[in-house]
Amino acid sequence: MLSDILSLLDARSFSSPWFWLVLVSVWTLAGRGVLGVPNDVLAGASQALRKSDDPDPAEAQLLLDWLSLQLPRWKLGRAMGMAMSAIVAFSLSVLAVLGFRYQLEMAQALALIGIPVALLLILRLRLAGQLEWVMEAARYGQPVRPAAIEAMRRINRYRLQHTAVSLLSVTVTAFWAARWLVLHPNGL
């Protein structure tokens, strides 16, 4: 049983078009929206906040409405957060050890996808926590415009971090795969 799992993890991945299709799909899906808020809502709110002097622009209100609907989905209780952290940390540690210590190619490939995705999850959960404070201030009387400006500032910072993690991850994965294929031309 264990040898079957290890032989599966040692399967060729860096030379497989399926691996590259999965890599592109993961990063494409990861870049769609922020916390479930569509990109067109974010773009409309950003444009309205920059060009309009209206203290209560409709696009900014739409952004805050979307956030009020989406943020509860990103709340984790203390027990759930600890359990999820333990499971993800254990899984990624096992993949990293099997891949980089014991030279199993599939484990390396999965670790090169999983570790940055886990980092993005941490960044998203942190952003959700920060935006929760912004939404609380908006619920208790802060005008729409300052709340939307603060939300967009934090979202734009997250987008910059997301782009940096994505580019770095794909670059490192491509270089590691090229190195692996040069050092192991026949898969050995």
Image (spheres, helix red, strand yellow):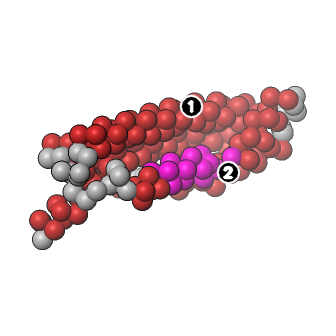
Cα separation, mark 1 vs mark 2, equals 17 Å
- Identity, as a three-letter code, of the amino acid under mark 1: Leu
Total tally of numbered discs in the picture:
2
Q: Quadrant of residue 13?
A: bottom left
Decide whether residue 38 is among the magenta residues.
Answer: yes
Q: Quadrant of residue 176?
A: top left
Query: Foreground residue, 114 or 125?
Result: 114
Would you name the residue on which mark 2 appears?
38
Q: Residue furthest front?
A: 186
Q: Residue furthest bottom?
A: 1
Percent x, y of residue 10 = 21, 57
- Please report the bounds of the magenta region as a residue range: 23-39
Identify the residue shown where x is 74% and y is 40%: 43
Would you name the residue on which mark 1 appears?
160
Query: Foreground residue, 126 or 19?
Result: 19
Q: Is residue 56 visible?
A: yes
Q: Is residue 87 positioned above or below 52 on the image?
A: below
Task: Provide the secondary structure element on which disc 1 rests.
Answer: helix
Percent x, y of residue 37 = 65, 50
Q: Is residue 141 positioned above or below 33 on the image?
A: above
Q: Quadrant of residue 4?
A: bottom left
Percent x, y of residue 158 = 55, 35
Q: Is residue 78 positioned above or below 156 on the image?
A: below
Q: Is residue 96 visible?
A: no
Query: Foreground residue, 95 or 180?
Result: 180
Label ID, residue 87: none
